[in-house]
């Protein structure tokens, strides 16, 4: 199902008069696409940028994909789109600027009430397995909306981009507790989407899990959630929604 999204996250304010095209930090996990839309306006002004779809996939036979950016405000909206590679290390997402795919246009101004098509295109041949990226779309501050002494805000959306996903080996999972955190290892090749993680001790007590929101675990990678006093819990039972399926398993302690 295709959904559109309004603002998912507000990045650090950019003071009026600063460069609109100054480099911003790579996208962060908190700004993941596919979250439920939050129908709020950017500040200052009523600008709302809607994006669809919230997940981009380019299959082996496809040359690219398109993303629709719609400006429902009453003034033109400057927008910048950039691509980042997406990997995971030490249980966390890692991003780096990438030119492996072509994003066109990368910078544009969308007139009031109109939709801009952004194309994400291959720049080479198909690959033997899944490749993962993040498309960062920044709603840039508009100098015309600046007011004396008022900061302008850059709004960021990030969308997962998967290339040649259909060639990846299916995801395979293993849970464990180590160093006061719970880890999910994916030994398969396909990325999986993780929601509604719940951890219980052997006697049924629910263990609070930090940063328990939508996460992805990439193929041949591991993600982690902080878990207070995890090494004192012993084996725990884990339930989650992974790619829309209920998963129930046991996480053994690897604390030593």
Image (cartoon, rainbow, N blue to C red):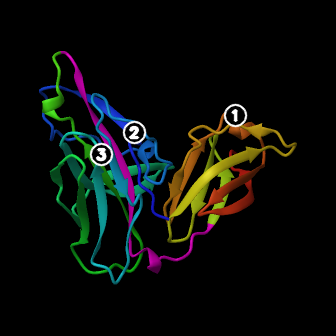
Q: Is residue 153 magenta?
A: yes
Assess whether mark 2 and mark 3 are in contact (beta carbons under 8 angstroms): no
Foreground: disc 3 or disc 2: 3
Residue 100, can we see it?
A: no
Q: In this view of the protein, which residue sits in the foreground, 179 or 106?
A: 106
Q: Secondary structure at mark 3?
A: loop
Residue holding disc 3:
72
Which residue lies under the disc numbered 2? 9
Residue at image position (60%, 55%) is 184
Q: Secondary structure at mark 2?
A: strand
The answer to whether residue 28 is above or below residue 44 is below
Left or right of 115 on screen, residue 206:
right
Q: Which residue is mark 1?
A: 229
Query: Of marks 3 and 2, which one's residue comes earlier in the chain?
Result: 2
Question: Residue 140: where, in percent of width, then height?
Answer: 22, 40
150 inside magenta stretch? yes
Residue extent of the magenta highlight: 149-172
Which is nearer the N-term, disc 3 or disc 1? 3
Residue under the image location 13 percent in, 29 percent down: 18
Q: Are marks 2 and 1 in contact (CB under 8 Å)?
A: no
Query: 129 or 240, which lies in front?
Result: 240
Quadrant in which residue 58 is drawn: bottom left
Q: Residues within 10 Å of mark 1 (few under 14, many from 20)?
A: few
If you read the primary sequence from the N terminus, does the residue marked by circle 2 or circle 1 appear first? Answer: 2
**Cα–Cα span, label 2 and label 1:** 31 Å
| Left/right of residue 238 with respect to residue 29 in the rendered view | right
Determine crowd level at label 2: few under 14, some 14-19, many 20+ residues with C-alpha closer than 10 A: some
């Amino acid at each position: 199902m295709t959904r559109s999204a309004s603002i998912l996250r507000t990045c650090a304010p950019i003071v009026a008069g600063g460069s609109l095209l100054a480099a911003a930090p790579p996208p962060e996990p908190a700004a993941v696409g596919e979250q439920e839309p939050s129908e709020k306006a950017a500040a200052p002004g009523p600008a709302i940028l809607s994006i669809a779809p919230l997940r981009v996939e380019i299959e082996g036979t496809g040359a690219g994909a398109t993303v629709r950016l719609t400006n429902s405000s009453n003034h033109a909206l400057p927008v910048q789109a950039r691509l980042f590679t997406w990997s995971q290390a030490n249980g966390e997402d890692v991003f780096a600027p990438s030119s492996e795919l072509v994003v066109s246009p990368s910078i544009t101004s969308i007139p009031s009430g109109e939709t801009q098509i952004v194309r994400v295109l291959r720049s080479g041949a198909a690959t033997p397995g899944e490749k993962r990226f993040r498309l960062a779309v920044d709603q840039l501050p508009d100098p015309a909306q600046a007011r004396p002494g008022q900061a302008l805000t850059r709004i960021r959306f990030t969308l997962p981009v998967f290339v040649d996903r259909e060639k990846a080996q299916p995801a395979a999972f293993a849970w464990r507790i180590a160093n006061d955190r719970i880890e999910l290892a994916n030994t398969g090749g396909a990325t999986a989407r993780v929601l509604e993680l719940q951890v219980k001790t052997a006697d049924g007590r629910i263990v609070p899990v930090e940063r328990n929101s939508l996460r992805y675990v990439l193929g041949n990678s591991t993600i982690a959630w902080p878990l207070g006093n995890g090494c004192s819990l012993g084996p725990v039972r884990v339930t989650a929604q992974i790619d829309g399926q209920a998963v129930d398993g046991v996480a053994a302690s690897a604390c030593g």
